[in-house]
């Protein structure tokens, strides 16, 4: 009886299963990996274009390296899908970015082949530098590889790592995956520098031809090549009277290499290993390679939801807080020429595309450089400009020092549009927007607003922009509005009370969790009032005085309990002499990959769980240990 023959990809349980593959088989394997990634992401959503661009590079890495003894550190990590497929996770790949399934990013708790947690950009070189030094100290002969995109070189931390690593004697290979993009087109000096390197066709052809010739010489080929490496720079100076900035940092520089040629890649990696000191391998790839829709529109296919493979079209997600923010800011900019919008490589994601096209002179994409964005905004503020920095909550975490020292101390007025605040579906622990409320509370002169609807957002944005001084911010979630009662309307007030006759218990919340709070209010038999905080930093003293009138106050928030708004509200109540019962429910650990409804249920913040809390019923609430 005939049986279906396994594909090459299905036969792989570890990278060593590729050892006997011919170059032709490796190319077939690459095609199978692309097909599997496209099929899976079309159902689960995820990062598509970036993963399709590094398939040959990933195969060559695992063909050449001996992982997990050798370590591969992926910068950001959104290009690790092929890596997961080659390291024993083929059978689980259909559960990518689903609750209980595979993370969309590297995670050492998931596999020994994932060397480092990666979710934010420009960190790989620093982490790999530490691992390489540890290997040197241990004398184990292992190699460490950092794979970073050219977009990561718009972030300053990458240069801190390169500067530290280049003059070491550690076995470190830095692979610069040059696809000329991060999410959108790259900007700045580095993009021009890489373009200049790519244009050196005469030098590249000379070097490749010499390499192939020497490596083909029996017995003495490799020693000869090492000798030639030592005189390589002299030849380059003679031809170009210059070196690359990477060589100035102490790296041996190879490239550009065709990132879709398995033969060239494996040879270059083998040579880099043989050098035994820091090497930078410059690899050119095409984002979206192998899927025409992604090749033609790599920005849209960088990260997306489920889509139709044949047409490339996804299901429409409708309006969103990000889009509403962009529309309102653009409207206000027509009336006030002082307004200036800033993004850190997230123009489309933060809703600023329309603003950038209408007011290009009042728009800046600074690249993946959130720290610079804040201080840049503070500098603009010093000269009478009204800067608005739209940034994902998870990336604002990088800006604490700049917010505190470069902005708050001087009381400079900047506005933050904190996007993706609260639970963020699918991308897991590294991308949840749960921490901004806690760390912003520690910075003086901050005002933080939390709209519950698009109309709320418009009022909050105007209030934040025209505050006299200091940091003014508004936080809003990914996606659209949550259901609210038909008679709900936004009010330009710091807080709003939705009361019932004779209520002695008060449910307090903010932001879009108001939807669950008001649904719970309607579902319970007893009268319960709901207090919506629109201004959450500082908490309005009048709201605290109002809450003291109740026998019990229950605070729920889609953010961290530790150091969060609810904890501060309870402290203010007690300091004011409140003797009633106070209950706080928020999130207590790193939230794993999940949808928003799943996350709310895990944390006991969905409507049913809030109703049970109000009725005094026991419910199973996930703790940090449960998240693990």
Image: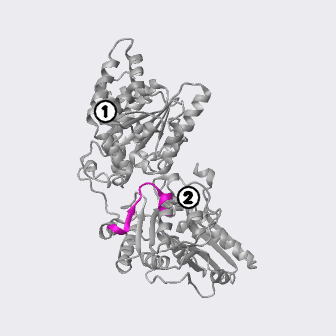
Residue 300 x/y as whole percent: 32, 55
- What quarter of the picture does the N terminus occupy? top left
Q: Which residue: 39% across, 63% down?
A: 364
Provide the secondary structure element on which disc 2 rests: helix
Residue 274 located within the stretch drawn in magenta = no
Q: Which residue: 30% across, 57% down?
A: 314
Residue to which mark 1 is pinned: 239
Residue 50 x/y as whole percent: 36, 46
Is 561 placed above or below 61 here?
Answer: below
| Residue 319 visible somewhere in the drawing | no
Residue 514 x/y as whole percent: 52, 74
Tell me the crowding category of disc 2: few under 14, some 14 to 19, or many 20 or more residues within 10 angstroms, Cα based: many
Provide the secondary structure element on which disc 1 rests: helix
Magenta region: 360-374
Label whose residue precedes the other's in the sequence (2 or 1): 1
Residue to which mark 2 is pinned: 602
Nearest to the eye among marks 2 and 1: give it: 1
- Left-right relation of 179 to 121: left
| Residue 135 visible somewhere in the drawing | yes
- Left-right relation of 42 to 617: left
Q: Residue furthest top?
A: 219
Residue 276 x/y as whole percent: 49, 26
Toward the viewer: 182 or 526?
Answer: 182
């Amino acid at each position: 009886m005939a049986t279906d023959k396994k594909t090459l990809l299905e036969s792989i349980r570890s990278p060593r299963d590729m050892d006997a593959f011919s170059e032709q088989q490796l190319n077939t394997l690459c095609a199978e990996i692309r097909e599997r990634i496209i099929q899976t992401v079309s159902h689960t959503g995820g990062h598509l274009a970036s993963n399709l661009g590094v398939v040959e590079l990933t195969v060559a890495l695992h063909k050449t390296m001996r992982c997990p003894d050798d370590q591969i550190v992926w910068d950001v990590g959104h290009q690790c899908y092929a890596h997961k497929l080659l390291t024993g996770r083929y059978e689980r790949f259909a559960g990518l970015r689903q609750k209980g399934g595979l993370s969309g990013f590297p995670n050492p708790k998931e596999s020994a082949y994932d060397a480092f947690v990666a979710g934010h950009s420009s960190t790989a070189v620093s982490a790999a530098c530490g691992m390489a030094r540890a290997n040197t100290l241990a004398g184990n002969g292992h190699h460490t590889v950092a794979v970073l995109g050219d977009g990561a070189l718009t972030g300053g931390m990458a240069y801190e790592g390169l500067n530290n690593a280049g003059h070491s004697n550690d076995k470190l290979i830095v692979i610069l995956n040059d696809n000329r993009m991060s999410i959108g087109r790259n900007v700045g000096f580095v993009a021009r520098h890489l373009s200049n390197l790519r244009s050196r066709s005469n030098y590249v052809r000379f070097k490749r031809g010499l390499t192939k010739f020497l490596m083909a010489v029996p017995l003495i080929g490799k020693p000869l090549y090492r000798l030639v490496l030592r005189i390589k720079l002299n030849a380059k100076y003679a031809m170009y009277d210059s070196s690359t900035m990477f060589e100035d940092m102490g790296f041996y520089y190879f490239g550009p290499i065709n990132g879709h040629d398995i033969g060239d890649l494996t040879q270059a990696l083998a040579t880099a290993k043989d050098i035994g000191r820091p090497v930078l391998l410059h690899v050119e790839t095409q984002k979206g390679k192998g899927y025409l829709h992604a090749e033609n529109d790599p920005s849209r296919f960088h990260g997306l939801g489920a889509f139709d493979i044949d047409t490339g079209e996804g299901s429409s997600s409708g309006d969103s807080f990000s889009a509403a923010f962009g529309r309102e800011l653009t409207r206000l900019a027509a009336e006030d020429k002082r307004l200036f919008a800033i993004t850190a490589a997230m123009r489309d994601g933060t809703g600023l595309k329309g603003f950038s096209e209408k007011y290009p002179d009042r728009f800046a994409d600074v690249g993946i450089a959130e720290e610079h964005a804040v201080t840049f905004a503070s500098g603009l503020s010093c000269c009478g400009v009204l800067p608005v920095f739209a940034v994902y909550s998870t990336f604002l975490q990088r800006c604490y020092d700049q917010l505190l020292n470069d902005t708050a101390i001087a009381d400079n007025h900047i506005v933050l549009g904190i996007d993706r605040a609260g639970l963020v579906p699918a991308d897991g622990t590294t991308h949840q927007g749960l921490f901004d409320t806690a760390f912003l509370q520690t910075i003086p002169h901050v005002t933080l607003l939390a709209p519950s609807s698009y109309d709320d957002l418009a009022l909050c944005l105007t209030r934040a922009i025209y505050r006299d001084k200091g940091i003014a911010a508004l936080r809003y979630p990914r996606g659209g509005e949550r259901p609210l009662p038909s008679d709900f309307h936004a009010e330009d007030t710091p807080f709003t009370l939705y009361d019932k006759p004779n209520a002695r218990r008060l449910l307090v919340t903010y932001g879009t969790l108001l939807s669950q709070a008001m649904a719970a209010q309607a579902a319970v038999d007893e009268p319960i009032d709901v207090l919506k905080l629109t201004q959450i930093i500082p908490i309005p003293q009048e709201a605290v005085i109002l809450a003291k009138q109740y026998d019990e106050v229950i605070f729920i928030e889609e953010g961290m309990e530790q150091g969060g708004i609810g904890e501060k509200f309870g402290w203010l109540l007690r300091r004011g002499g409140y003797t009633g019962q106070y209950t706080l429910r928020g999130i207590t650990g790193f939230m794993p990959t999940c949808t928003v409804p799943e996350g709310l249920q895990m944390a006991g913040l969905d409507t049913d769980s809030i109703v049970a809390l109000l009725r005094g019923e026991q419910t199973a609430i996930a703790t940090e240990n449960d998240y693990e």
